[in-house]
Image (tube, rainbow, N blue to C red):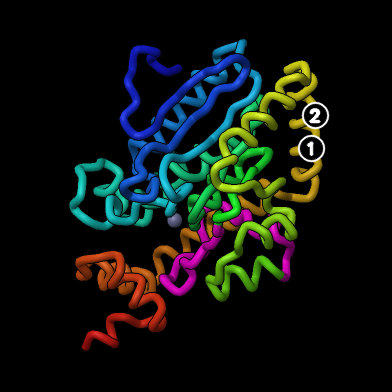
Amino acid sequence: MSDPSHQFRKIRYEVDGAVATITLARPEVANAQDTELIDEVDDAFDRAEADDDVRVVILAADGRHFSSGHDLKALVGDVEPDEWRRLRETPEGKFRHEQVMYFDRCLRIYDFRKPTIAAVQGSCVAAGLMLATMCDLIVAADDAVFSNPVLRMTGAGVELLVEPWELGMRKAKEFLFTGDKIDAQEAWRLGLVNKVVPRDELASATRELADKVALVPPITAEMVKGSINHTFELMGKRQSWQYHFMAHHFTHNTATALEALEARKQRTSMKEVFADRDAGDDPTAKRA
Ligand code: ZN
């Protein structure tokens, strides 16, 4: 259980009436998710869980973009001291890190007993998309853009393969193989988001939706959410995610992936890393 006196540094947690809002607050790095931010989001969900007055949780983000994904700089660079970064030097440690911090933490949101709504603007990339899709509903600003361009960087998607469930099989394959972006209107057409609203109405439209959902008695909302999620359990959603997590980790530790990771560490900016990514799959050879 969280310590209520703890002050958040990388998120904000606010309760207004029946609605709690958790806001990612690292706009200077497009809300890249580092260890502290992920811990704080989890802590905030603890608070929302414990507060009987809270009936609905909104997950929002400050700034132009919802989230650029996991903070790769923090993971491979020397940006900040982090116990997990040292652990990630081995396949076992990498597995443990991603199981605890990514897999379990995301499923915790997916399984959260109260309804959740993500409010998404700007870029929603890779683990940003994973995070948003853990919520029950998604409201997108008209400038929202969804992408998961990690396959060219050797990554087998992110830790939870949300795409087939969100986009259907055909589109999921295209989306992942090409790394192409999906804009807000297409996201709505595909059923990835519930509604698209003008950027300056994102907060009010999300709140309006939350207020409506908050009218449902909490036990009823909990039962219906659980029942809908159970429908997807019967289709194998969680087991597919477990399978994918193992496949994801096998792919993390291939010679190809480890060479690419070493090459990435030699680069000084993410811009260079992305240039490598978009040039093809063997940056080490290109540099030679
Ligand atoms: Zn991973």
Numbered circle sitting on residue 228: 1
Residue drawn at x 61%, y 69% as measured from the top left: 175
- Which residue is rendered at x = 80% and y = 45% of the image? 234
User: Does residue 89 sit above or below 138 in this rendering?
Assistant: below
- The yes-or-no answer for disc 2 within 8 Å of ligand 1 is no
C-alpha distance separating marks 1 and 2 = 6 Å
Residue 77 tag number? none
* Residue 146, image x, y percentages: 56, 59
Which residue: 60% across, 14% down?
17
In the rendered image, the quadrant that contains the C terminus is bottom left
Q: Which mark is residue 224?
A: 2
Q: Is 252 positioned to the left or the right of 245 in the image?
A: left
Which image quarter has ligand 1? bottom left
Tag 1 near tag 2, CB within 8 Å:
yes
Whether the magenta-drawn stretch holds residue 102 is answered as no
Q: Which sits in the foreground, 14 or 48?
A: 14
Could you tell me which quadrant the N terminus lies in? top left
**Amino acid type, callout 2:** Val
The percent coordinates of residue 215 (x first, y second) are 76, 19
What amino acid is at disc 1? Ile
Magenta-drawn stretch contains 166: yes
* Secondary structure at numbered mark 1: helix
